[in-house]
Amino acid sequence: GSPVEVDFNWAMTVAEGVHHDNYWGLAFSDGMRAIISSLEFQLQVGDEIITSKPLYGCTDNYFSVESPRRGQVVRVVDLSNPDNLLEVLNPKTKIIFFETMTNPNLKVYDLEGISRLAKGVNPNVVIIVDNTFPGPAGCNPLLHGADMVVHSATKVLGGFSQEMAGVAIVPKDLWKELFLYRKNTGGVPAPEQIHALLTRG
């Protein structure tokens, strides 16, 4: 990435309350590209995903339409009660994906409870949290059991639709793989786009 993007990636890592020795951010052209990339770079045919509703409309459509096309199974449970995970969690479960604060009804889940229960059953499961609504000032999911965080930076981080961008904050040992996935599939943000987000957001 460009020097501007490197600054933004570092700033997002700091904003999420974690150290850049352990985590690193990666910017994308928009929020959906950040979400899809954070999923697809680590999923294979036959993997299972657990999610909860409601979700941002495009994310919901991705799970209901695109994931099955790619040979993945999506299990939808009400994560208001973490124990509901026990109904569907199994060794094929690769990812649990949900929003810190749901769009549009602002439901909030027990991050630590979900993480503790899920990893007690399947230690390899990856918990990805969309932190768009509260932003890093409102919540830092990586400090409460999430493995990866994604944002639509088009919203809170960018001043709400002044720019389009997305960001994922991932463990540093996965960053190169995600970077190469972005390189191979697109979704690279323009430097001026990231500069505007960095300086304003």
Image (cartoon, rainbow, N blue to C red):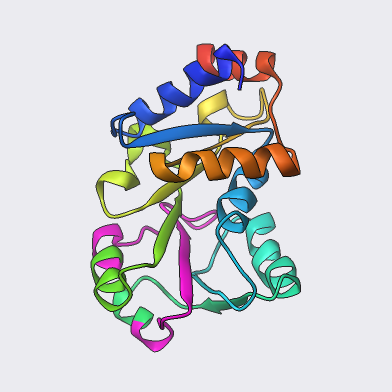
Locate residue 192: give its quadrant. top right
Residue at (56, 20) in percent of width and height: 5
Q: Quarter of the image holding residue 127?
A: bottom left
Residue 137's spot in the image, x, y percent?
35, 31
Depth check, front residue: 12 or 155: 12
Q: Does residue 184 lie above or below 123 as drawn?
A: above
What residue do we see at 31% from left, 37% from top? Answer: 22
Does any portion of residue 201 appear in the rendered image?
no
Q: Tell me: 127 left or right of 3.
A: left
Q: Which span of residues is magenta-colored?
A: 86-114
Residue 96 sits above or below residue 145 on the image:
below
How far across and down, in percent of the image, does residue 24 sit? 42, 33
Left or right: residue 169 versus residue 141 is right
x and y percentages locating residue 76 in the rendered image: 52, 77
Above or below, 125 relative to 91: above
For the point 29% across and 80% down, the residue is 83
Q: Position of residue 39 (x, y in %)?
A: 57, 57
The answer to if 179 sits in the magenta stretch is: no
User: Does the magenta run of residues contain 106?
Assistant: yes
Q: Is residue 26 visible?
A: yes
In the picture, measured across the screen, residue 137 lies left or right of residue 27, that is left
**Image quarter of the N terminus:** top right
Number of numbered discs on residues: 0
Which sits in the foreground, 107 or 94? 94
Q: Residue furthest bottom?
A: 87
